[in-house]
Image: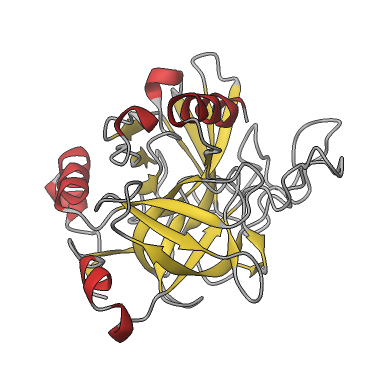
Amino acid sequence: MRKLFVLMAALIGTLAIAVAPGGAITGDWVEDNEHPFVGLVVFYDEDGEFLWRCTGSLLTPTVFLTAGHCADTVSGAVTARVYFQQDAGVNYDPVTQVDPVSGYPEYCADGTLGETCATSDELYNIGFTGSLTLPNTHDVGLVILDQPIELSEYGVLAEAGSLDQLATQRGLQDLTFTVSGYGLTYRQNVNNKKPNESYRERLMALSHLVNLNSAFNAGFNLQTVGNGQGEGGTCSGDSGGPVFYGGYESNIIVAVTSFGLNALCRGTDFAYRTDTETVIEWIREVVGEEEFAKIQFTTI
């Protein structure tokens, strides 16, 4: 969580508005049993101490896509561990600070390593800069797993420029998106004194397109909204999680959750686009041609 507060302070200080990093699924959400490749990723410093947690998507058995501010090696991230159970942290014990079933956030429980849990000491980001270079925050990261996770399906990336058509043909296109993540479900409100609440399980919610071309977007970010009435948004801990084009059954990733404009997670969310030539070519450079060939791409 420290990472989230540091990032929030930096963004607020620069923009003088209430900007907060993306966290957990809020609003009208449902359990996400549709996307087994979406995982809860925990980052550690050089001493193996917990730093922060995020969400991400497995594109191949070893290539895990997340946000750049999650895989931020400059801020101290050295290693990571990824849990793919839908209820990865549900049994978290605040006394022991461990979920004994999954091992979150300290270890992979017996029988889960290489099955539903993996470690990593290869972290990359595309040069995360945060609000210093808004709208282009370079907020994409990769975690290369030490143990391959074999699944029946993986996340599919939208081809370069896929979202561009939505800016000009909005009346002819589906404007529905699905967000998925393991973050906070209720953000503390200083007025009602209710504490933060996280189920630490994979949840998803529908949202809809607001803008692609505002000052906060400009071809780099996707702005969506979902604040109830059948929709939901993101909050702390959902950072890096996928934004799928379409409804709950879609596996087409067009962006990763990046930041929001409301510290209470009221459903106005921004995600860094992955359907750009720059991001796609960067992924190719990091993983190499052989692994890149395993990643699936599609049109929307």
* Residue occupying image coordinates x 15% and y 50%: 290
Image quarter in which the C terminus is found: bottom left
Q: Is residue 154 visible?
A: no
Question: In this rendering, is residue 279 above or below 52?
Answer: below
| Closer to us: 53 or 88 | 53
| Closer to us: 6 or 101 | 6
How is the protein colored in the picture?
A: secondary structure
Q: Position of residue 172 (x, y in %)?
A: 29, 86
Question: In this rendering, is residue 195 above or below 252?
Answer: above
**Total number of numbered labels?**
0
Q: Position of residue 104 (x, y in %)?
A: 66, 40
Image quarter in which the N terminus is found: top right
| Closer to us: 5 or 98 | 5
Question: In this rendering, is residue 206 above or below 119?
Answer: below
* Residue occupying image coordinates x 39% and y 41%: 145
| Closer to us: 57 or 135 | 135
Residue 138 quadrant = top left
Question: In this rendering, is residue 250 above or below 260?
Answer: below
Q: Position of residue 82 (x, y in %)?
A: 52, 43
Residue 143 quadrant = top left
Q: Is residue 167 visible?
A: yes
Q: Position of residue 90 (x, y in %)?
A: 75, 51
* Residue occupying image coordinates x 49% and y 54%: 269
* Residue occupying image coordinates x 67% and y 55%: 201
